[in-house]
Image (cartoon, rainbow, N blue to C red):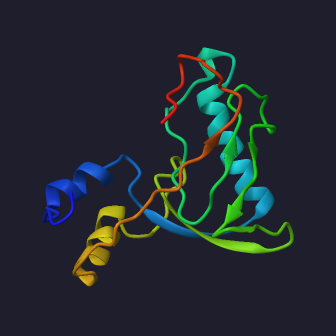
């Protein structure tokens, strides 16, 4: 909350996971889209035995649209980065953590966030990038917030 001190407990509540290491990767538009499609399929696959996890990736700067009822490779669209369309022939630096099976030598995410919090005496209000969901209608299985 505004004015509240961020404690180590608060930090760990938000960042403690099984795969904490951070990494940087260069990815093209197609690779970013495929990564989002793969994650999306683990959540919205028609076969419930194929469901894994339950969260879509959070993004900084990148916004995208997701159509959960569409088939694999057709769910993700409209992917602007900082308000501009990402280019098919350009490579983008992607910082990530919690990517699962591939571990990197990067610092655990809680250390990276702690360094950031120490360097910023006041944390600015931030509006998270939320995917735009398409085609849900009145489906009670999806939240509209």
- Residue at image x 85%, y 66%? 88
* Residue at (74% x, 49% y) in the render: 34
- Please state the horizontal and vertical placement of residue 76, each as a whole percent of the image: 73, 44
Quadrant of the image occupied by residue 66: top right
Q: In this rendered view, identify the residue nearer to me: 37 or 143.
A: 143
Q: Position of residue 131 (x, y in %)?
A: 59, 46
Residue 86 percent across, percent down from the top left: 76, 67
- Number of marks in the rendered image: 0
Q: Quadrant of the N terminus?
A: bottom left
Position of 17 relative to 105 (above/below)? above
In the depicted view, which residue is nearer to us: 35 or 102?
A: 35
Q: What percent of the width, then of the height, locates residue 132?
A: 63, 44
Residue at 60% x, 18% y: name it: 139
Task: Work out whether residue 12 or residue 131 is closer to the camera in this orientation and state it.
Answer: 131
Q: Nearer the viewer, residue 99 or 5?
A: 5
At 80% from the left edge and 74% from the top edge, which residue is drawn?
90
Rendered view: 74 above or below 120: above
């Amino acid at each position: 909350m505004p004015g509240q001190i961020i404690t180590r407990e608060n930090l760990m509540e938000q960042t403690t996971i099984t795969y904490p290491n951070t990494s940087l990767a260069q990815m093209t538009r197609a690779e970013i889209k495929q990564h989002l499609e793969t994650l999306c399929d683990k959540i919205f696959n028609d076969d419930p035995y194929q469901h894994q996890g339950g969260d879509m990736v959070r993004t900084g700067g990148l916004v995208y649209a997701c159509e959960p009822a569409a088939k694999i490779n057709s769910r993700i669209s409209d992917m602007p980065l900082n308000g501009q369309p990402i280019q098919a022939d350009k490579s983008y630096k992607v910082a990530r953590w919690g990517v699962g099976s591939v571990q990197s030598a990067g610092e655990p995410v809680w250390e990276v966030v702690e360094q950031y919090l120490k360097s910023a005496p006041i944390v600015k209000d931030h509006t998270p990038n939320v995917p735009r969901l398409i085609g849900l209608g009145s489906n009670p299985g999806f939240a509209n917030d």
